[in-house]
Image: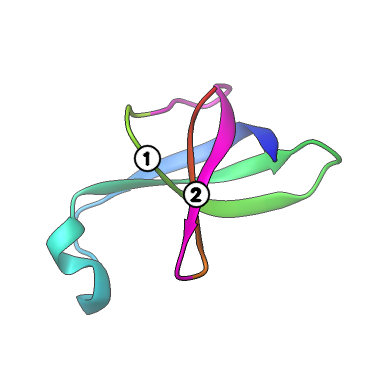
Amino acid sequence: MNGIVYTETVVHSAPERYALEAPYQIAIILLEGGRRLTARIAGDRVAIGDRVTLAEDRDGVAYYRKA
């Protein structure tokens, strides 16, 4: 599933489950077809308008990276 970054932010104060991974970036991805999905960003940081592709799914969390 490919898409474009609609908006993004960096999480510094994470929920307990993800506290050891902070800071990390999350984004709302506008998928091809018009749906939106909240996802973690793997690898390099992304900016609004960047094209992204699905990298993996970990425990039900989608991870995207720059295309």
- Residue in view at x 79 percent, y 36 percent: 32
- Residue in view at x 68 percent, y 34 percent: 2
Q: Position of residue 41 (x, y in %)?
A: 41, 42
Q: Nearer the viewer, residue 54 or 25?
A: 54
Q: Are marks 1 and 2 in contact (CB under 8 Å)?
A: yes
Q: Position of residue 14 (x, y in %)?
A: 24, 65
Q: Is residue 22 above or below residue 29?
A: below
Residue sitting at the far right? 33
The first of marks 1 and 2 along the sequence is: 1
- Residue in view at x 19 percent, y 54 percent: 12
Query: Quadrant of residue 10 in the image?
Result: top left
Residue 49 is covered by the magenta coloring? yes
Mark 1–mark 2 Cα distance, whole angstroms, equals 9 Å
Q: Nearer the viewer, residue 28 or 56?
A: 56
Residue sitting at the far left? 20
Q: Give the residue pinned by disc 2.
A: 56
Q: Nearer the viewer, residue 64 or 25?
A: 64
- Residue in view at x 52 percent, y 27 percent: 48
> Is residue 42 toward the left or the right of residue 19 in the image?
right
Q: Is residue 28 above or below residue 47?
A: below
State the mark number for residue 42.
Answer: 1
Residue 53 is covered by the magenta coloring? yes
Disc 1 residue type? Answer: Ala
